[in-house]
Image (tube, rainbow, N blue to C red):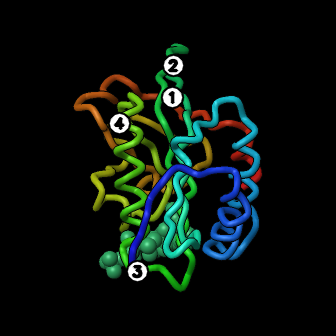
Amino acid sequence: MPLTIRPETPTDYPGISEVNDLAFGQPAEGKLVEKLRKNPKFVPRLSLVAETEGKIVGHILFFPIIIKSANGKEKETISLAPVSVLPEFQKQGIGGELIKEGLKACRELGYDSVIVLGHPEYYPRFGFEPTVKWGIKDPFGAPEEAFMALELKEGALEGAGGVVEYPEEFNDV
Ligand SMILES: CC(C)(COP(=O)(O)OP(=O)(O)OC[C@H]1O[C@@H](n2cnc3c(N)ncnc32)[C@H](O)[C@@H]1OP(=O)(O)O)[C@@H](O)C(=O)NCCC(=O)NCCS
């Protein structure tokens, strides 16, 4: 099965919403992507689709966020969310390819770290570790092991302890 991972284009928008709706079994994540696209901080190069035979079968989005320390210091990083693969295409490595290609693109654009809130059994295989290691907290009260980070540059998160601030679009998910 030939698989292409590439940045989204406007003609992909309906396919991306559909992949999110079907993967998550609810419309919240697809709506989140649609709303974030209108946010000035949206980076089109970091909204990637997985395409096979002209069909969008997977999607991943990275969106810039801030870690705010108690003394008001701000550190820019990027969040990985959401990532989705059509149910009938899951467990074939497509999610992994989206994550690897996405991390590569983040590195190329100069991001030095990535934050994810997700399955604690899945993301460590890409190098993610619980953020407690750096004293970084999530604003949602998620289980500690589900809030993870990856340094794309060694030491990037040292001294970056604080609370992550997501754009308000995430509040509806
Ligand atoms: C998570 C997701 C993107 C992975 O895509 P994929 O193409 O199936 O991923 P891969 O084929 O690269 O990897 C499959 C692995 O992911 C694991 N995985 C998938 N969902 C998981 C979950 N909820 N918890 C833990 N592991 C999970 C599978 O167990 C499998 O592990 P294995 O390789 O040991 O068999 C896909 O399952 C999906 O769209 N799920 C619904 C939406 C979702 O939960 N997104 C992530 C939110 S954090």
> What's the amino acid at mark 4?
Arg
Provide residue 93's location: percent of width, then percent of height.
Answer: 36, 73
> What's the amino acid at mark 2?
Glu
Few, some or many C-alpha atoms within 10 Å of disc 2 (few <14, some 14-19, many ≥20)? some
Query: Residue tagged by mark 3?
Result: 91
Q: Quadrant of the N terminus?
A: bottom left
Query: Residues under labels 1 and 2: Cα distance?
Result: 6 Å
- The furthest residue to the bottom: 88
Provide residue 28's location: percent of width, then percent of height.
Answer: 74, 61
Tell us which disc is closer to us: 1 or 4.
4
**Residue at 62% across, 47% down:** 140
Query: Residue tagged by mark 4?
Result: 107
Do the numbered discs 3 and 1 sit on residues whose CB atoms are within 8 Å? Answer: no
Q: Is residue 156 left or right of residue 90?
A: left
> What's the amino acid at mark 1?
Ile
Query: Residue tagged by mark 1?
Result: 67
